[in-house]
Amino acid sequence: MQAEEHTLEKVVCEAEVEIRNADGLHMRPAMQFVDIANQFECDITVSNSENSVDGKSIMQMSMLAATYGTKLKIRTEGAGAQKAINALQELVEARHFDEPAPGEPKKS
Amino acid sequence: MKLSDFVCFKAIIPELKAKDRDGAIAELVTALDRAGRLGNDNSQEIIRVVIKREKEASTGMGKGVALPHVKHGAVKDVTAAVGRSSVGIDFSSLDKQPVYSVILLISPVDNPDRHLQAMESIFKHLQRDRFRKFLRQSATAEEIEDLLKEADEDSSL
């Protein structure tokens, strides 16, 4: 077991995602993001052109004010880094926070 | 965006009378209404929808602050009221702790970016321990107004 600890390297993953829901990263999507982020052990950092924030903090994520079309960089580091980045990428780009894209009718 | 661009200084309540969430929301909406920010006869409807939104998911984000908000056609631009409670209010917050500072935000229906910019401006300061502490300690409307104006000038606050 000791040998394993010595060879343990921190896995780092990075991805760029684009906000695709019309209302952007407002509080509800930010909460969804933080909920998923907190399921993982790794450190998660999210950056826009100005700030880098803790992807597990709702207050910090709300500060990004990412509007529709904004590109964010997600960086995960540590245990589960790859799984975490996949899950977050899916939330933002594939599911776009379960919200409508611009011009799409709102789901009731 | 600066705090003074959208916080309505006539709608600052230094000591909320309400001891519960719904009462605090009603007080803050009423303050905005009295300040003339909500058009005609919209306040009861806005109180209802803000509470409805709050029931769907609490905006009590922990660390003693809550940010109830809603989009409503009564406003053309973002407007906010600020309330303080020295005894604390149960907002079903994420950290289960009482809320001492409540910022109520009403945003226009058709401008999601403006809403996000206001949120950014609020959280830039709210995430700082020092700002939260000062806000909690400000006992008069003047002190709260001064703090918000100071925060606009001093990006480290």
Image (cartoon, coloured by chain):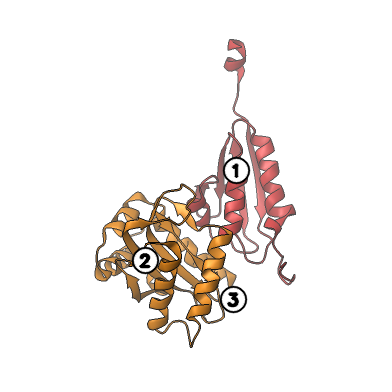
Chain colours: A red, B orange
Name the quadrant containing residue A3: top right
Report the side of B131 relative to B104 (left or right).
left
Residues marked 1 and 2 touching at CB (< 8 Å): no
Q: Residue furthest bottom?
A: B40
Residues marked 3 and 1 touching at CB (< 8 Å): no
Residue A60 percent location from the top left of the image: 49, 51
Residue B128 percent location from the top left of the image: 38, 51
Please give the chain letter of the residue carrying mark 2: B
Disc 1 target residue = A37
Circle 1 — which element?
Answer: helix
Of badges 1 and 2, the one in the foreground is 2
Q: Residues within 10 Å of mark 2 (few under 14, many from 20)?
A: some
Which kind of residue does numbered mark 2 sit on? Ala
Q: Earlier in the sequence, mark 3 or mark 2?
A: 2
Total numbered badges shown on the rendered structure: 3
Between A48 and B108, the residue placed more toward the observer is B108
